[in-house]
Image (tube, rainbow, N blue to C red):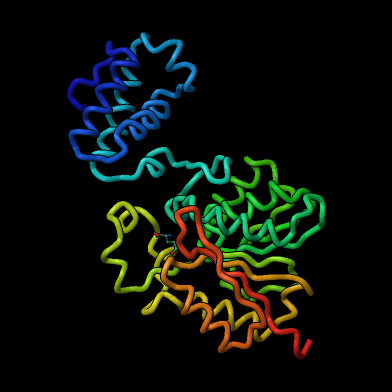
Amino acid sequence: MISGLTPTLSREAALRLLVRMLEQAGLPNARADARFLALHALALTPLDLTLRGREPIGEAGAHRLGRAAERRLAGEPVARILGAWEFWGLPFSLGPETLVPRPDTESVVETALRLFPERDRPLRLVDLGTGSGCILVALLHERLRAFGLGLDRAEGALRVARANAERNGVGARAAFLRGSWLDALVGPFDLIVSNPPYIAAPVIATLDTEVREHDPMAALDGGPDGLDAYRAILLGIARRPDLLSPGGALVLEIGYDQAAALTALAGAMGFAEVSIGRDLAGNDRVVTLRPSLQGR
Ligand code: GLN
């Protein structure tokens, strides 16, 4: 057991002790991390902590909090310890085969929603490499008559995504299937969205340890130049533009330095429209593509 985290300690005192331990380990968000871990390990709401902070953490609480602290001190991200994280203001469970949803990815959701601003319009959506299902579930949550298909190669991710759709009240409008990019799809879809793996293989070694050691490699590794998934997706649409409805679009997350490469790739494959959007930090983060209508 982590020294000092004893059963008679009050919830407030345990939280203060945890903050100090994480600060001493040099963790940059010690206060927020400690609060998340304490609420989780002690199964408290923020209100419980405020109103009943003097109550002791007890034997089981001390054990669970100690275990959570050990994992955080060993470098595991808070979201992994919780097994859950928030995206688009909604709760998402995580699994070993899903990324932790990033705030950057909310730009994909925003871009997609702007293309189809009416809340009640029936839409058909696909999310390629759905992972936790966060993009698809957020879209279904905002577009009340949309139906969405989430594809992933990882069975474990599909189970997590399905549970997340149920948990967020959109399970009846979502289906999750094992599949690789566009191969097995029959369209037309109004929106095809994806946050594919896009880290170039040589860059992987330079990623934050929290990402490199705890996010699934299959969700990060974009091949030698990071563009393998985009090539597969764009080629799939270029060959079968009928996968998109007239007015339909492809909305993809990209790395902050990939806008030029994506624009060149889309140009070479004859896409009619390519536009780049930014995330809240001002980095290029989203590409919107429409295929040429020729040959339809
Ligand atoms: N944005 C993620 C990261 O920086 C990468 C996600 C991805 O490859 N799709 O770690």
Q: Position of residue 179 (x, y in %)?
A: 59, 69
In the rendered image, the residue lying farthest to the front is 282
The answer to whether 50 is drawn above or below residue 202 in the figure is above
At 54% from the left and 49% from the top, the residue drawn is: 160
249 horizontally vs 206: left or right: right
Q: Is residue 178 visible?
A: no
Q: Nearer the viewer, residue 201 or 162?
A: 201
Image quadrant in which you'd find residue 289: bottom right
Q: Position of residue 243 (x, y in %)?
A: 72, 76
Image quadrant in which you'd find residue 112: bottom right
76 horizontally vs 270: left or right: left
Q: Is residue 256 visible?
A: yes
At 37% from the left and 9% from the top, the residue drawn is: 55
The answer to whether 237 is drawn above or below residue 177 in the figure is below
At 65% from the left and 43% from the top, the residue drawn is: 166
At 79% from the left and 86% from the top, the residue drawn is: 296
Q: Nearer the viewer, residue 231 or 5?
A: 231
Q: Quadrant of ligand 1?
A: bottom left
Q: Position of residue 232 (x, y in %)?
A: 54, 79
Q: Position of residue 1 (x, y in %)?
A: 21, 27
The answer to whether 141 is drawn above or below residue 290 in the figure is above
